[in-house]
Image (cartoon, grey):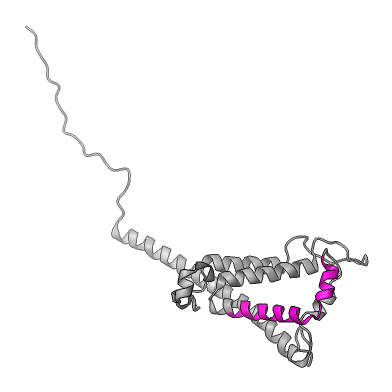
Amino acid sequence: MAVHEHPHRSPGFPLRSSRKNRTPSAAGDAVSTLTDTRTARAYAFASLRLLTGFVFLWAFLDKTFGLGYATPSGKGWIDGGSPTKGFLSGVAVGPMESTFHEWAGATWADWLFMLGLLGVGIAVTAGVALRLAALAGTAMMALMWIAEWPPAKHLSDGAPSMSTNPFVDYHVIYAVVLIALAVAGAGVTWGLGRIWERIPVVRDHRWLR
């Protein structure tokens, strides 16, 4: 006579989830930390934006009114001085040396340079049209980089160029900062970026932001 043995079933144990449920307080702390990080980042970019804008605005004011810093008193643009003549006529190295000498003191060069300083300065300080400001500012910095030509170890007359880095100088830094501000949309915090974006033509054409 065969005896059939039925295996005894042990009471089952609930499987524990490998992922621990987050408590409401932990989730709240995570959200708070993320918010604080984003806020700090926004303030950092806003501070960088204001400082950069002031650099361009101050250059415009000093060259226009001859405040006695880079531009001597009485030799400002309003006094009949040329904002480009001193710098461009002093170019002593690089592939565009002769071209810059021809541009030095030209009326169109003075106006383009000064309008560039003013436009970039106002846009960056106010936090509006940052993409256009980045484009114009980068073009301006590129031309000034070529004028100083950091890769050269010697000037055209053979004298040491005193270049400290063959590639990266303050013009490159300013250009990168302008691009970073535009990419980050840094005009909202401490700026008029939010209002600017609501203007119909700006809303319809993102490249104007």
- Report whether 170 appears left or right of 156: left
Left or right of 134? Residue 86 is: right
Which residue sits at x=84%, y=74%?
Answer: 101
Q: Which region shows up in magenta?
A: 96-122
Locate residue 196 relative to residue 79 in the image: left or right. left
Give the dominant element type of the magenta stretch: helix, strand or loop.
Answer: helix
Residue 115, magenta (yes or no): yes
* Residue in front for this viewpoint, 178 or 47: 178
Residue at the location (14% across, 25% down)? 8
Query: In which quarter of the view is residue 180 placed?
Result: bottom right
Q: Note whether residue 66 is visible.
A: no
Q: Could you say where residue 150 lies in the image, as x and y percent from the top left?
A: 79, 64
- The quarter of the rendered structure image containing the N terminus is top left
Residue 41 vs residue 99, the one in the foreground: 99
Q: Is residue 134 magenta?
A: no
Q: Position of residue 29 (x, y in %)?
A: 36, 62
Residue 200 or 30: which is nearer the viewer?
Answer: 200
Residue lying furthest left: 1
Name above or below for residue 2 compared with residue 94. above
Residue 106 pos. (x, y %): 79, 80
Q: Quadrant of residue 34?
A: bottom left
**What is the total number of numbered labels drawn onto the structure image?**
0
The residue at the point 69 percent across, 65 percent down is 172
**Residue 156 seen in this snapshot:** yes
Side of 177 relative to 111 (left or right): left
Residue 93 percent coordinates (x, y): 85, 66
Which image quadrant for residue 92? bottom right
Q: Residue furthest right?
A: 157
Q: Residue at x 21, y 39 (%)?
A: 14
